[in-house]
Image: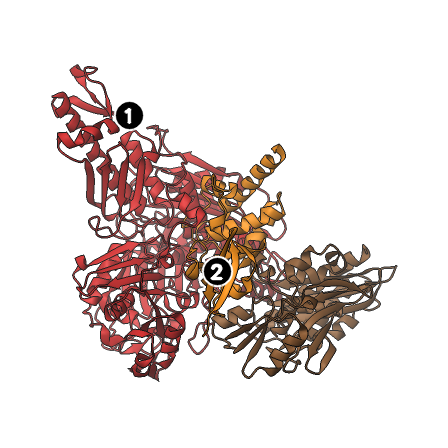
Chain colours: A red, B orange, C brown
Amino acid sequence: MQEKVRDLPREPEYRVVGTRPIRPDGVDKVTGRARFGADLNMPGQLVGRVLRSPHAHARLVRVDTSKAEKLPGVKAIVTRDDFTDQASEFVPAGEMLINYRDVVRNVMAREKVLYEGHPVAAVAATSPEIAKEALRLIDVTYEVLPHVMDVDDAMLPGAPLLHEDMITQGVTPAPTTPSNVAKRVEFLLGDAAKGFEQADIVIERTFKTAPVHQGYIEPHAVVASVAEDGQAEMWVSTQGHWVVRAHCARLLGMDINKLRVTASEIGGGFGGKTVVYLEPLALALSKKARRPVKLVMSREEVFRATGPTSGATVWVKMGAKKDGTIVAGEAILKYQAGAFQGSPVGPGCMCAFAPYDIANVKVVGFDIVTNRPKVAAYRAPGGPISGYAVESVVDELARAVKMDPIDFRLKNAAREGTKAAYGPKFGPIGLVACLEAAKKHPHWSAPLGKNQGRGIAAGFWFNIGGETSVSLSLNEDGTLTLLAGTPDIGGLRASLCMMTAEELGIGADKIRPIIADTSMLGYNFLTGGSRSTFSSGMAAVEAARSVIKQACARAAKLWELAEDAVTFEDGFVKPAGENAGKHKPMNLGDIAKIAGKTGGPIVGTSAINAHGAAPSFGVQISDVEVDPETGRVSIVRYTVVQDAGRAIHPSYVEGQYQGGAAQGIGWALNEEYIYGSDGRLQNPGFLDYRIPVASDLPMIDTVIVEVPNPRHPYGVRGIGETPIVPPMGAIANAVRDATGLRLTALPMSPPRVLAAIDAARAAGDKSLKVG
Amino acid sequence: MAKIPLSFTVNGDPVEVLVSPQQTLLDVLRDELELTGTKEGCGTGDCGACSVTVDGRLVCSCLMLGVEAAGRSVGTIEGMASADSLHPLQQKFLEHAALQCGICTPGILVAAKALLDRNPDPTETEVRYWLAGNLCRCTGYDKIVRAVLDAAADMRATHSAA
Amino acid sequence: MRYEAPETVEAAVGLLAGAAGDARVLAGGTDLLVQLKTDMIAPALVVDIKKIAETRRITEEAGGFRIGAAVSGAELKEHPRLKTVWPGVIEAANLIGSTQIQGRATLGGNLCNGSPAADSVPALIAAGAIATVIGPAGRREIKVEDVVVGPRKLSLTKGEVVVSFFLPARPAHAADAYLRFIPRTEMDIAVVGAGVSLTLDDAGICRAARIGLGAVAAKPLLAEEAAAALIGQPENDAALARIQAAVSAACRPIDDKRGTKDFRIKVAGVIARRATEIAFARARTR
C-alpha cells in the first residue's frame, strides 16, 4: 500500500509533477540496450588487471616487473613509480572529504600496503589470460607488519601504527606521539552535565556495528584511451564524472580540458562510486601502451578493495524527566576510516540527536584508521550508525517513562525553529507530520502474533545542493533536449523532464534528457547527498525559465511589442494586457521556426551553486518474528513514512524509500565483513556477504509526506539517503519488543540473537519474552 | 590455447563463434557476440544478473562453459521483446517503476519470464522464492514483485481472451 | 585446459584414468566453474559427462528409482512420481542455491564436490541411497555415506566417476524430509542440514529410521545412534526431545564464517527435530 499525506493543501495543482509517466531511459533498461561500465569496448583495447597485496599491513619494499614486461602480449605495466606523489589537500567527495596525498596512495600503494587488496601494480595485455599470467610474474617483496582491524584495538597504546606521522587533529594540546586516531570532533549545545542533573531517568548503552558494503550489483568498470598528444577519453561507471576528471587530471598531471569523461549508465553506487580506484590506473596504462585499456573489477576485488562504510563503537547516554522531556544527550562515536583518514564520523555526530529538540547535547567523535579498505560514502554516511544507537536508547527511555514510542518522539520532536545540535535552526520540516502519519497508519495498530514484536525509529539526513550546470535547447520542431550532468542513479531523468515540462506547459515526452559528458557542460558536482533531483531540477527550472524569456522576447520582436507586453501561459506565448488577442498565440514549435531570423537558436542554460537544500525526516515501523530456537529474525511487515517536500515522480520516491529500507534491513540482520586473524577477508562475495534476497522481505509500504521546501521551485527535498537511517533502530526496537532483550551489536544475526536468548534464559532473566 | 568452433542458437538466430574452452557462456555472449544485455555481477552464480535460458531452462550463464551450449537454444534479454512490442513483463516493469539503476533488470526479466512460462498464476511467495537468486540492491523487490504479478494477470487475461 | 564431452562411460573413464595432470568431471558445473573462476583449481582436462545417457535418466528399477548422476535438481522436481515418494530428497536438491543453480546442479556433483555442507547429501544418506561408480576396474556400488571421507576428499580412485544413484523401494508408511538452517531464506550454504527418513507401522510407531547430517562434521554424517533413538517410538514430545539431544551429541562441527561450533550443535538438534516431525506427518499419509 502506497499513500500520500500532505501537510499543506494541494496548491498549486500541477499538470505533470506528481504524476507517474514512464521514465525516458526505461525502454533501454528493460531491453538490455542500456550500456553500463563494462558494456563498452573500444577498438584495439587491452585488458587491464590489478595486482593486489595479500597482506593487511606491510612495507612495500620492491616491485619487480621485469619478468612480466618480457611476456609477449603485455603492452604496459604501471607501479608507484608511474604516479607522482601528491601534497596533502582535502577536497569534497560527496558528503565526505578526501585527501589527494591519500588518494594517490590508495589507487597504488607507495611506502606501505595498508589492507589486503591494496593495489601494488597494474598491467595491460592483449588477453585476460596473458594479463593474469603477467600478474603472476610480478615479483613483490613485502616486509609484513602486525595489523590492526578493530576500532577499539586501534586506539590502544602500542597498537600497530598505520601512518607513522599521524598526529590526532582536534585535540588541544596536540599529542606528541603519533597514533591511529586521525582526528577528534566535538559538537556542543547547552551544558550536557547540567542537563543530566535535571533528569529523572538516565540510560546509557554502548553499541557496536560492523562495516558493511554498499553492495552495488555492478562492479567498478572503466575504459580509458590516451592519445599521443595527451588528449584522453574515458567511459566509466561513476556517480560523478566531473569529479573523476578532476581526480584523474590531478593524479596524472594533465590539464583538465584534455580529459573527456563520459558517465555510463551506473549499476548502483550508493556513495561507493564517488571516488576513484581503477580510473587513474586505466589512464596511466593507456598512456604507456598507446591503446585503450579496459579495467573491470571482479566481485572479489570489489569487496576486498573498495570502500565499505565504517564499523563503529558508539556510546550513548540520554536523560529524561518523568513527563518524557529529554533533557540531555551525550554520545561518543568511534568510527573506523579504513586505511586512510576520513570516516563519516562528523556527519554521524551531527545526525545523532537531530530528530530531537534537546537543550543540552555533547557529541564527540573519533576518526580512526585500521588495516581495512578505505571507507567510502554509503547512503547517509555515518547517520545510520549513530541513529541505531540513539533510537535504541530513545526506545528504552520511552519504556522507562511508560510512554508510547510515537508520543515520546512527538513530545521531543524537532520542529520548525528548533536549533539542531550541529548548528542551524530548522526551517519547515516534516518529522511531526511523519510521526502523526505513522500513528494513524493501520500498521501501527495491527495485532501481533506469537514471538512477534514491533519497533519504530526516526531518521534524518541533511541533503546538499552544490555546483550544477544544465543546458536546454529548443529544437527546430519545438521539442527540447536537456543536458544535465548528475548521473542518474534511480529515476532522475524522469523527474527532470517532468519539472521542465511543468515549467514549459508541454508534455514530459517532448523533452529528451541526456546525461552529458564533461566536455558538454560547466562543472557538475557528483550525484550524492541526495542532491540530483534538487540541484539539477533547480537548474533545469532556471534554464526552462530562460527559454521562456527568450521565446517571449522573440515573439515580442515579431509582434513589435515591448518584451513585458508578452506573456507565457500553458505552453503558449501570447500578447498581454491591452494587446491581448491581437496576435495568434505561438507554441514552442512556432517560436522555434522563427528563432533563426529573430536572433538565433534558443538555448537556456543554468550554472548554479544550488542553495536551499532542506532536510528530509522519516519514521519507519518494523514488525519482526523471532525464532527462539534458532535466533533467526524475519521481517514480517514494514512501513516507511518520510517527508519528500514534493514528490516529483511518486513511484521513484517510493522506490528510494523501499530500497534504502532494504539496505538498512540487511545492515541490521546479516551484513558484515568477516576477517580472519590474518587480516584477510573471508567473505568477499555475495554468497557469504548476505544482502537481502527477494524471499527475505515482505512488501514495503510507503507514505509520502509532503512539507514543501520553500527554497526550491517545486518544494523538493532530497530523499534518497534518509530511508537507510531508521531501519537498524526500528528492527532493534522490534526485536526488543518481541524478546524483551536489547541487542547492542550489529548485525543481529541468528547466532547473536540465539546467544542472547539462551543467556537470558540461563540467568532466569524475567524480561525474556520468548521460548 | 587452440580455439574451438561453437555453434548454437541465440534468441532464435543461429550463431557460430570461436571460443576458448574456459570461456563461460556469459563471456561468449558478451565478448564474442556483443550481446551485453546479460551482465556479470559476481561471476560465481550468486547474483543472477547473468541469467539466461538454455533450452527453456533458467540458468546462470556464468556457470556454464560456452562449449556446453553447443547445439542448444539460448534465450537472452535481447530476445524478450517481439518485433512489434515489449513483452508484458517489460511493459509492467516500466509502469510499476520496478527498476532504478537497471543492472539487475535483464536477469530478473529473464527469470520472471521463465517463471510465468511454467506457472502462469504464481503467488507472491512463489514469485519471491523463484527470484531469490536475482539480487537487487536498489528496489527492495516490492515493485518488482508487483510488476511480475500484474504481468501474470495480464497474460492470463490475454490468454483466455484468445 | 582441454574440454571433452564423451558419449560413453568407457570413454569418460579412459579420459579420466589416462589424464596426465589434474582432470575434473563436469556435470552441472555450479561448483566447478566457481572453482575455475576463483583460481582454486586449474585442471588440464575437463570431462563433461552430460552426453552419457546413463547419467541423465531417471528410471524405475526394482520398485525403487535409479537417478542419473547428471540429472539437474529442476528435472528431479519435474519428475511426476519422485517428489511423492521421496519428498525430502527432492526438496534437498531444490534448496541448493537458487532457481538458476537448480537448473544445472546435480546430485552427482553435489556429492562429489565433497563439501560437508552439501544440501542433497544428508537426504540421500537418510534415504539409504547407493551410488553406482564406474572406473578402470569396472562397476561398483558404494553407500552414499561412504563416498565423502573429508572436505573435498572422496573414496573414489583415479578414473572413477559416479554415474547414478539407486533409491530403494518404499514400504507403506515411509517418508523423508530435509531441513536446513540458513541465516536468510534462500541462497546461503547450509549452516546445518538434516535429512530424516522414517518407516512407521500401522500404529504410527517408528520401525526404521535413518538420519543424515550436513555441515556438522568434516563430512556428511550418518547419525546411527540418533536414528536408533527413534526406533520403537511414536511421535511424542519425549521422542522428539531425545532426537534433538541425540543429534546435537552426534555433531562434531567447526567454527567457520558460516557458524560457530556451539551454534551448529544447538541448531542441528532443533532442525533435526523439526525434520523428524515433518517426516512423521508425511509417513502417516503414505
Q: What SS does tag 2 mark?
A: strand
Q: Which residue is drawn at 53% across and 46% down?
A: B145
Percent across and percent down for residue B2 are 46, 73
Q: Along the line of sight, which residue is nearer the eye, C213 or B43?
A: B43
| Amino acid at pointer 1 | Asp
| Chain letter for mark 1 | A
Image mark for residue A311: none
Q: Along the line of sight, which residue is nearer the eye, A637 or A169?
A: A637
Percent across and percent down for residue C61 are 80, 65
Residue most extreme to the right: C202
Q: Is residue A167 visible?
A: yes
How many tags in the picture? 2
Image mark for residue B16: 2
Task: State which mark lies toward you, 1 or 2.
Answer: 2
Q: What SS does tag 1 mark?
A: loop
| Chain letter for mark 2 | B
In the picture provided, is A497 more to the left or to the right than C250?
A: left
> Which of the 4 quarters of the picture holds residue A126?
bottom left
> Distance of mark 1 from mark 2, alpha carbons?
56 Å
Q: How crowded is mark 1: few (under 14 residues within 10 Å), some or many (20 or more)?
A: few
Q: Quadrant of the C terminus of chain A?
A: bottom right
Does A425 appear above or below A731? above
Q: How crowded is mark 2: few (under 14 residues within 10 Å), some or many (20 or more)?
A: few
| Amino acid at pointer 2 | Glu
Location of mark 1 (residue): A570
In the picture provided, is A612 more to the left or to the right than A620?
A: left
In the picture provided, is A740 more to the left or to the right than A619?
A: right
Does A356 appear above or below A108? above
